[in-house]
Amino acid sequence: MLTEADQRRDELESILASAIFRKAPNQSRLLRYLCEKGIDGGTTEQLKEHQIAIEALGRKDNFDERENSIVRVEISRLRKRLRQYYETEGRGHPVRIAIDPGRYVARFVPAEADALAAEADAVAPREDADGDAYQAEDTATPTRPGWRAPWWVAVLAAAVLLAVGVAAWRVWRASFPLATAQQAQLEQSPAAAEPGPSAISDGTVRILAGYDRPVHIDRLGRTWRGDIYYSGGESAAAPRQFLARTSDPIMFRHYRFGNFSYNVPLKRGVYEMRLYFGPGVRPWTFADRPEGYAIVLFINGRDLMFFLNFGADAINGPTPDVRVFKDISPAADGYLHLQFKSANQYDYVNAIEITPSARGRMMPVRFTSRDYSYTDVSGKIWEPDHYARGGTLVERRDPVKGTPDPDLFSGERFGNFDYLVPVATPGTYSVELGLAETWFGPTMPGGGGAGSRSFTVSCNGTQLLKDIDVYREAGGSNRALVKTFHGLHPDTDGKLRLSFIGAPDKAMVNFVEIRDESK
């Protein structure tokens, strides 16, 4: 059973993963900051503008709220986005996040209470673009004392309102066909599910094992169903802990364990499957067995065993393990049969993801060095930056030349860092790196130029680039440079570790693309 704090965190993460907030980094940071202040019973006192500006919006200590209205502006925009969210994607949520006008406190309230507050807010003083309160002028047409409109006027007005309401409902429903279809399937019991289309229109199935809520939208914007299609085993929650290299720790908070199976209905075809395993499940913890332990899995009756490795970054704390399997297909009965049958009855899984794919090839992995997804000029979708340890994400504003898609280079991770990317084994892969010098140069904020930055890139210990100077090789600042490497193989854990090392802390990258070159 989820605690109140867990429910609040889930609501916050759902909002931050929504389409409305994914492209609003300032309001997302601000909302997380305000919510974290009170989500575990912490302070709910009114925060000061100066404090919010520094801690949530990254302003300097000399910030003066009398000369800069950024906090009031962003709070006003945040309240507007919250209203939009609960009018669309979050319409059916039982718990909502509310920020009262003129206050800097985030409250978790029942949906009914928030609706009443919204009605009161409609006639309360509103905020202008700078967050300052004003009272709307009364523009209603004056009426003569004692005069009443004829009854037919009221009837006509009611009919107009009803027509507008029905039209708005149809538009809203049409804009969320996926959510409606998902909800209809979720209302079925697992036992009643028949082979056929999955919950996601493109054929993808995503299941959070042991999760007792209908749907979760993760930080990458992907929709996961609560636990379904299972038989046997028990569900449980893992202790809350820091997890390295994941953008969404909620995915690893619930699991199914014991001897159990999943019988997932799929259309005919070839799929890629990812299994997610988090450390800290009972009876083991990361401290007990940092090396992980064996999982015994049967896929349509074919058995395999693999060892989980949670100690890949022991210095940074436990790291979830993700295993990728290609060329997965349903059995003749239209189901994919997954059986976890360890002799010690402590097999487990946190999440299952099954996606349509091509035979013999893992789907490309693409991510940019930014905290939200991006669709490039050719229509390819790039995930937000993840799998990373170390370094810092920044966004650059100057356009990059020499590329048909300069926005791909607008985000950057810099410092000393690495990515631990799960891939299917066996396999041979190519890695493409996007690089642009957007800090150093005679006209740039960092000054300097050639020789200001050099770094080395390696994959699983094999050197790919040695002392590369992007400024020199690209021919100046804000110029695109793309480097591609072939014939790379994963380690025994099914990972490609891309390490970026510069002295001092000057390595960088704008995007990474990994493609399966297996024949």
Image (tube, helix red, strand yellow):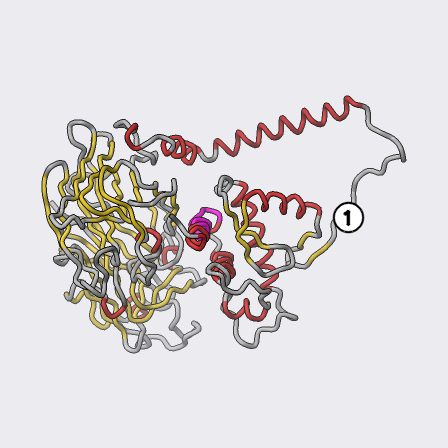
Describe residue 447's horizontal placement relative to residue 291 as left or right. Answer: right
Q: Which residues are the magenta region?
A: 11-20
Residue 353 horizontal/vertical position (percent): 26, 43
**Amino acid type at mark 1:** Glu
| Residue under the image location 54 percent in, 44 percent down | 111
Q: Is residue 453 above or below residue 418?
A: below
Of the pair 499 and 386, the residue shown nearer to us: 386
State the residue position of label 1. Answer: 137
Disc 1, SS: loop
16 falls in the magenta region = yes
Most frequent secondary structure within the magenta stretch: helix
The quarter of the picture where the C terminus appears is: top left
Describe residue 171's horizontal placement relative to residue 484 as left or right. Answer: right
| Residue under the image location 32 percent in, 53 percent down | 253
State the image quarter where residue 465 is shown. bottom left
Of the pair 227 and 196, the residue shown nearer to us: 227
State the image quarter where residue 338 is shown. top left
In this orientation, does residue 22 appear?
no
Residue 53 horizontal/vertical position (percent): 55, 68
Residue 93 horizontal/vertical position (percent): 49, 43
| Residue under the image location 32 percent in, 35 percent down | 202
